[in-house]
Image: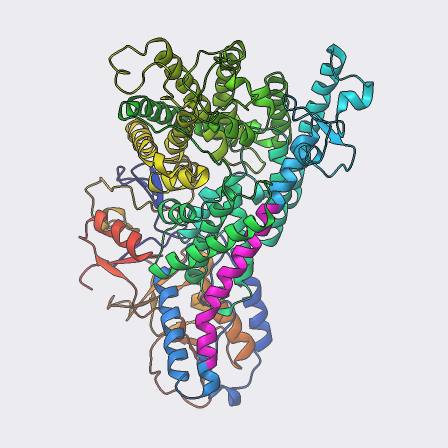
Amino acid sequence: MYNHGYRRESFNSTRSGTSDEDMVEIAGATLDFSVTDDVPPLENAASEGHSTHNGIGAKEASKMMDFLDEPVPGVGTYEDFNTIDWVREKSRDRDRHREIASKSKESTWALIQSISDAFTGWLLMLLIGLLAGSIAGLIDISAHWMTDLKEGVCLEGFWFNHEHCCWKSTEITFEERDKCPQWRSWAELISGKTDGGLAYFLNYMIYIFWALLFSLLAVSLVRSFAPYACGSGIPEIKTILGGFIIRGYLGKWTLLIKTVTLVLAVSSGLSLGKEGPLVHVACCCGNILCHFFTKYRKNEAKRREVLSAAAAAGVSVAFGAPIGGVLFSLEEVSYYFPLKTLWRSFFAALVAAFTLRSINPFGNSRLVLFYVEFHSPWHLLELIPFILLGIFGGLWGAFFIRANIKWCHRRKTTKLGHYPVLEVLVITAITAVIAFPNEYTRTSTSELISELFNDCSLLDSSKLCDYVTELNSTKPADDLPDRAAGKNLYQAIWQLTLALIFKIFITVFTFGMKVPSGLFIPSMAVGAIAGRLLGIGMEQLAFYHHDWVIFKGWCGPGADCITPGLYAMVGAAACLGGVTRMTVSLVVIMFELTGGLEYIVPLMAAAMTSKWVADAIGREGIYDAHIRLNGYPFLDTKEEFRHKTLAMDVMRPRRNDPPVTVLTQEGMTVEDMETLISETTYSGFPVVVSRESQRLVGFVLRRDIIISIENARKRQDGIVSTSVIYFTEHTPPHPPNSITPLKLRSIMDLSPFTVTDHTPMEIVVDIFRKLGLRQCLVTHNG
């Protein structure tokens, strides 16, 4: 009999027949069919047990018990950085359901408990939605205030941001609606001047000071209290939902520090967003709340159903897109997503969105982040520039993934990784120094995107809306014709071009630093800038050359036919799709985000084009690439296994290697077992009938053996080193004065999944993916 996948060492590649590793490279992703070695402290506890019980008399040794008739703490649990056994977890949940269903027929109290058990899932979703929505509202309000703090302060109350400070002011003009006496810039407070070189220099220096202070606080808190709070969190969430265990990644400290440092990181002006980390925050909420419900606390598979719903709630509060959140969880992060999880995810996302709407952090009584209202429909011929934006999004997405992965790999493999604080401060300083002179990079990225999505009207004072207007025009203010660009618009084009170049490159170095950093908003910003520039170009082309063939019939003189804001929205979707490779969920998020349901076809065309172009260059999205970079064991269901190998080609040990380490169902002593465990690093052992007859009986985990022996020494009298261990159902009779044997049948898996040694590896990989196996035994003639 041969076994596959029990060593700590992993296979490297099926391409190499001489590899001593146990890790297989499949389509560029690292797949771990083994589990890492649990290294619990057995040896010390075992030696203590020897000295404690060796003197037990034979009179008390006549009774043998299976002490595992009662649950033993630790048996059936998992160590950190291990993979859960989906099959075992689902089986446990089915057994629990059967027990509850059978008891519910016996008494009214048991029936009430059964109803309560069924209701706990919905109650948990309600609590997750309320908590995630509340934290998201707090983050939005705090980030907005701290972002404005870099430029000035409100005299009526320092806790007011710029917009709230000027809301009730009666001393503002329409042209300068963002200036009011209650709001003072730092230069005005220090020098009393609002204009001039000195005022500009003071504002410049104080802007850099606040940016460095915020980023320093963020990276210091992450490094000191919660190292897992850095980054986006989505690659790790995806790995955890795939069955991997990372203790502390979804803990209370991570939640607290990520919430605080996310506000600081966004406020520092770095090219990052809060949307990705909000998914991590929501999953932390879900994981913490799971501990209050027994059926989710004790079952890792059930807990992952909750985390899938929490991820949906995270996207819901990040974008105000509950339906898009559910689809994002289904398409992008979830590994196991049954139908009931779909409904519960929708409920959690709905509650989270309602909670955020009740808090009203944007002050506009709307749930959506970038509400748009375009006044002219799009034309079929505009699909050509929309597809061009899709091509740009795919090219930029592929470039960004390759460049960012190379930079992150360099960070991990060089001395750069030893100085995370210095790296964050340097990137922040570069960002602040370059961003301040350009008004489109100085402002927050969310406000920039909102301005780029905006459809110009006569009331807009933005540079992007500076057109030459005919004074005798009789058109209504919301139905303006295409007009010639004004002086300020040309200046804005140059500033946006510089902002585009800056955003493209600085985001590569920012994403992956030791601060919370999302990628949704920076990606959308790059696409929105490119789209707005293309939209302005198309608008001017139609104005000056309306007699061209492509414009005849739908874009004549005086017509309002090109909407640059729509191009910005399509470009944002294209670039986000090129980076993340989302399709359906991306389109739904975009039309929920903007309220532009009638523009779903341009969004679909751009999203599909960007995905096709990016996939032609590289198959991995940014999250899959970071999973591979960090070496997380994740079986991607989208990847294909292309190697023509059999199970015997990758199992350990091979045919010519020393025989596999096995346990016999009877005859081994406690000392034999402890010696075997101390001399090997396997995570589990097959149990066979005997050394001569290698017929498979079951499979037992190393961790369960360690915990069981330790508990038996404490709870069962007479267990010594020479005690015989039995995995059989019926044990042979033994004399009254003999040493007490130890029965461990309860910890053995009696139905381990097996394949024959001639099973093609593509079938084995498919089995691991679809069943969520932790290990698979390879047998020869049984």
Please tell me how many numbered marks the rendered image carries. Answer: 0
Q: Nearer the viewer, residue 298 or 122?
A: 122
Locate the N terminus and report the quarter of the image it occupies.
bottom left
Q: Is residue 280 left or right of residue 555?
A: right
Up/down of 733 relative to 305, above or below: below
User: Residue 122's x, y, as percent?
Assistant: 46, 64
Res 429 seen here:
yes
What color scheme is it?
rainbow
Q: Nearer the viewer, residue 52 or 586?
A: 586
Q: Nearer the viewer, residue 327 or 480?
A: 480
Q: Is residue 710 left or right of residue 28?
A: right
Res 304 seen here:
no
Residue at horizontal 48 percent and vertical 71 percent from the top: 708
Span highlighted in magenta in the image: 112-137
Residue 415 location, quadrant: top right
Q: Is residue 5 left or right of residue 144?
A: left
Residue 705 location, quadrant: bottom left
User: Residue 347's x, y, as percent?
Assistant: 45, 57
Residue 361 covered by magenta stretch: no
What secondary structure do most residues of the magenta stretch adopt? helix
User: Residue 329's x, y, as percent?
Assistant: 40, 48
Q: Nearer the viewer, residue 485 or 585?
A: 485
Up/down of 496 relative to 232, above or below: above
Residue 124 covered by magenta stretch: yes
Q: Is residue 739 left or right of residue 752?
A: right
Up/down of 532 relative to 729, above or below: above
Residue at horizontal 57 percent and vertical 27 percent from the top: 416
User: Residue 107's x, y, as percent?
Assistant: 44, 88
Residue 31 location, quadrant: top left
Locate the C terminus and report the quarter of the image it occupies.
bottom left
